[in-house]
């Protein structure tokens, strides 16, 4: 299964590198959908029927999750909780895009254009993977760290006692089911 995900990841990288911005999206989506169907994975990982734009966002999240080895339901749940799958979302504290990346975090992840949904999603899913790795696969701690920062989770040896973070973790875990 991992090798299939690696093939999907490589195809997406090549298409992104050598195709104009909008060309190749349909091919990638059709191929990923056919391959997902063939190996028994759901193509649409969202729990609600998305509109066309959200459908594109969902596909980008699924591809990024496959690329970085993250459960697509978890990546989708984080994106839903962060922005409602809205590429133009900006928080009052300056977090941007689908995955609500802070500009400094985006830079540290090598995201060149935080407003580009593809880069934003790739950076956010990569960051989620880093949190999962840091906390030895503990999804609850990783999700808490995505919201409150890894140092807060380390300081409290678990979910920090912040109501925002506790509510966020509960929401993400509920959406990821």
Image (cartoon, rainbow, N blue to C red):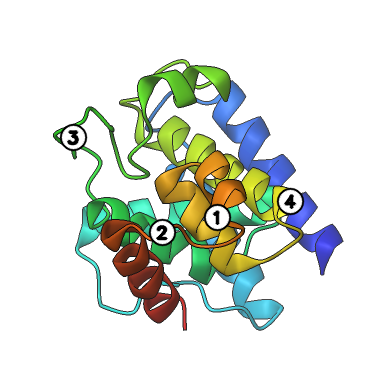
Q: Which residue is mark 3?
A: 90
The answer to whether residue 145 is left or right of residue 68 is left
Q: Secondary structure at mark 3?
A: loop
Instruction: Specify which label sits upstream in the sequence, 2 or 1.
Output: 2
Taking the spot 44% from the left edge, 75% from the top edge, the residue there is: 173
In the image, residue 119 lies at what x, y percent? Answer: 46, 31
Q: Quote the CA–CA distance across marks 2 and 1.
A: 22 Å
Residue situated in front as seen by the camera: 102 or 6: 102
User: Decide: marks 4, 2 in contact (CB < 8 A)?
Assistant: no
Residue 156 numbered mark, or none: 1
Q: Quote the CA–CA distance across marks 4 and 2.
A: 16 Å
Taking the spot 18% from the left edge, 34% from the top edge, the residue there is: 90
Is residue 84 placed above or below 107 in the rendered structure? below
Instruction: Specify which label sits upstream in the sequence, 1 or 4.
Output: 4
The answer to whether residue 52 is left or right of residue 19 is left
- Can I make out residue 161 in this image? yes
Q: Nearer the viewer, mark 4 or mark 2?
A: 4
- Can I make out residue 62 in this image? no
In the image, residue 33 lies at what x, y percent? Answer: 54, 67
Residue lying at the far right in this picture: please name it: 3
Residue situated in front as seen by the camera: 23 or 161: 161
Q: Nearer the viewer, mark 2 or mark 1?
A: 1
In the image, residue 51 lies at what x, y percent? Answer: 19, 63
Q: Nearer the viewer, mark 3 or mark 4?
A: 4
Instruction: Specify which label sits upstream in the sequence, 3 or 2.
Output: 2
Is residue 119 placed above or below 173 in the rendered structure? above
Circle 3 packing at 10 Å, graded few (<14), some (14-19), many (20+), is some
């Amino acid at each position: 299964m991992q090798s299939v995900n690696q093939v999907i990841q490589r195809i997406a990288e090549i298409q992104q590198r050598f195709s104009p911005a909008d060309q190749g999206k349909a091919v990638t989506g059709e191929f990923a959908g056919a391959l997902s169907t063939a190996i028994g994975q759901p193509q649409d990982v969202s729990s609600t029927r998305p509109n066309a734009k959200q459908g594109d966002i969902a596909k980008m999240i699924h591809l990024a999750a496959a690329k970085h080895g993250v459960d697509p339901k978890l990546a989708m749940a984080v994106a839903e909780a962060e922005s409602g799958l809205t590429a133009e979302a900006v928080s009052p504290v300056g977090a941007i895009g689908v995955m609500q990346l802070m500009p400094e975090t985006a830079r540290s992840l090598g995201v060149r254009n935080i407003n580009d949904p593809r880069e934003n999603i790739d950076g956010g899913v990569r960051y989620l993977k880093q949190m999962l790795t840091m906390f030895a696969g503990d999804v609850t701690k990783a999700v808490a760290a995505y919201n409150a920062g890894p140092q807060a989770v380390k300081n409290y040896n678990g979910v920090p006692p912040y109501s925002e973070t506790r509510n966020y973790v509960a929401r993400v875990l509920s959406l990821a089911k």
